């Protein structure tokens, strides 16, 4: 089981590097459904480990991140993430949160399968749409610990006209910031975790993230997204039907 757990953490890092998000969609169900962590604890682990990895990557990519839409997005998403983690999460039962998580996972999978996003949208910036997308992902982030990178990247393309490569790098920056905001809400409520477990989770996600950056250069994006979407369909369905 220990080897399987470490392998899952590596896959989480791979997903972050290859798709600009999606790591928490793998990590949180594994922590809650297999390792029997409470949703609060799983969310905290997810926010810390994914937030650190995406934050370090953002430092490396700081010259190529589209900071203007990142700031616009974050101004709306960060307060939503904090307030959701501080007030909405403790009011919502674990079963409801995991049901919402399952629905979110399925919607991400269907979006990836059926929405074709061009290399550049060519549309003018739609700030209202960007703000609505930001608030929605912020609420989800605070409620279940998901950064929402897989939704953020398409939102940046559709509502701000970024290219796919720009949107992935910018989404990682936003995920890092959102994770910090939501983390504040969980820490404020006194949610705690085991530090040794957190350290090796962080380490093996970092291994997967580093490998994913190298693998991404050699694999076709569309095929990767299709297989990942099919995997998410299975995860989302499992979460919703598991007693």
Image (spheres, rainbow, N blue to C red):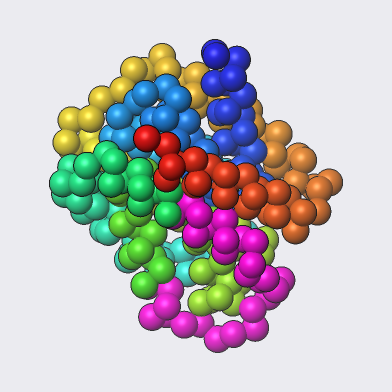
- Give the residue drawn at x 39%, y 65%: 134
Q: Residue furthest right?
A: 218
Name which residue lies at 70% across and 42% down: 213
Q: Is residue 32 above or below residue 122?
A: above
Is residue 117 highlighted in magenta?
yes
Residue 68 or 91: which is nearer the viewer?
A: 91
Residue 174 percent coordinates (x, y): 45, 55
x, y percent for residue 48: 40, 34
Q: Quadrant of residue 180?
A: top left
Compared across the picture, whether 227 is left or right of 68 comes to: right
The image quadrant that residue 211 belongs to is top right
Q: Say left or right for 130 vs 225.
A: left
Q: Is residue 45 left or right of residue 66?
A: left
| Magenta segment | 104-131
Quadrant including the C terminus: top left
Residue located at (16% from left, 36% from top): 189
Residue 149 visible in the picture: no
Q: How many marks?
A: 0
Residue 121 part of the magenta-drawn span: yes
Q: Nearer the viewer, residue 126 or 231?
A: 231
Where residue 166 sits, quadrant-wise, is: bottom right
Q: Quadrant of the N terminus?
A: top right
- Residue 208 lies, in percent from the top left, at 64, 32
Q: Nearer the viewer, residue 203 or 57?
A: 203
Residue at point 56%, 75% (across, down)? 158
Q: Position of residue 104 (x, y in %)?
A: 43, 55
Q: Is residue 203 at all visible to an observer of this figure?
A: yes
> Which one is nearer the viewer's eye here, 21 or 32?
32
């Amino acid at each position: 089981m220990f080897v399987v757990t470490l392998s899952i953490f590596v896959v989480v890092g791979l997903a972050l590097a290859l798709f600009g998000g999606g790591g928490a969609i793998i990590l949180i169900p594994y922590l809650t459904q297999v390792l029997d962590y409470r949703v609060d604890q799983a969310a905290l682990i997810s926010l810390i480990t994914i937030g650190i990895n995406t934050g370090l990557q953002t430092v490396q990519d700081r010259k190529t991140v589209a900071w203007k839409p990142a700031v616009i997005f974050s101004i709306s998403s960060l307060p939503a993430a904090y307030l959701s983690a501080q007030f909405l999460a403790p009011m919502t039962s674990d079963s409801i949160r995991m049901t919402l998580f399952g629905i979110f996972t399925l919607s991400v999978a269907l979006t990836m399968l059926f929405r074709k996003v061009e290399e550049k949208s060519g549309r003018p910036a739609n700030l209202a749409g960007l703000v609505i997308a930001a608030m929605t992902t912020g609420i989800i982030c605070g409620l279940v610990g998901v950064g929402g990178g897989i939704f953020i990247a398409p939102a940046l393309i559709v509502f701000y006209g970024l290219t796919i490569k720009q949107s992935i790098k910018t989404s990682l920056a936003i995920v890092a910031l959102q994770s910090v905001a939501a983390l504040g809400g969980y820490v404020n409520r006194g949610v705690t975790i085991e530090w040794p477990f957190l350290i090796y989770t962080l380490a093996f996600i970092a291994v997967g993230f580093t490998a994913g950056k190298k693998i991404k250069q050699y694999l076709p994006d569309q095929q990767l997204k299709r297989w990942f979407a099919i995997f998410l369909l299975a995860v989302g369905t499992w979460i919703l039907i598991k007693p």
